[in-house]
Amino acid sequence: MNDASARTPTSGRAPRMSPEARRAQILDAALPLVLERGGEVTTREIADAAGIAEGTIFRVFDDKNALIDAMVDRVMDPAVTLEALDHVDPEAALADKVAQIVALLHDRVKRVVSLMTALGPRDHARHHGKDEGRGPLGEATGVVESLLAPHADELRVDPATAVDYLRILVFGTSMPFIRSAREISADELTDFILRGISREGE
């Protein structure tokens, strides 16, 4: 058997996938490109990154705007973060819980901010207001409050107020136009939330 007959012939077509799986594959390939190039990225570049023909994109997305809209919806979807919060050990110590909560919420805000910054004002305006009424990280309020509630006697404020402070600080310190040039890590933020800005005993 020669080499030519041993090779499996290829048609040049993308492997058959369900529309949902194809959408996910395209969005996975497109996200790094959009973070790098913003809305200027082309569907040809996205197709090349996904290893598919450009026309395959338009079998599951009407146009590039529809693809970007789906990407924004995916990054803004709180489901993954909420599921992760559900796995925080309810028996853990307060400091451990806060560290996990802050890390998860900090990561969520950074992902959203990175994408919307890359897309710029035009695309940001198209998506502005989708989460109005809940406030920053509002979708996490209930689960975070339930995690802090058993530690009410360890807190200087009631759990609901503690959640408000936590959300505001995580959100605010993730905004490049609010914080200083130095990025604040999740560990630093956790320490501040737990201890404040004054020295202990003062």
Image (tube, rainbow, N blue to C red):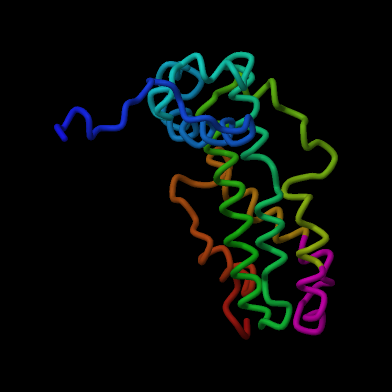
Rendering quarter of residue 126: top right
Quarter the N terminus occupies: top left
* Picture mark count: 0
**Foreground: 73 or 172?**
73
Task: Give the farthest residue toward the left.
Answer: 2
5 relative position to 160: left or right: left
Residue 62 drawn above or below residue 31: above
Give me the residue at 60% from left, 14% from top.
63
Quarter the C terminus occupies: bottom right
* Residue 21 horizontal/vertical position (percent): 59, 36
* Residue 190 horizontal/vertical position (percent): 58, 67
Residue 49 drawn above or below residue 55: below
* Residue 73 horizontal/vertical position (percent): 67, 34
In the image, which residues are magenta? 146-163
Residue 192 drawn above or below residue 182: below
* Residue 65 horizontal/vertical position (percent): 61, 17
Q: Does the segment drawn in magenta span residue 18?
A: no
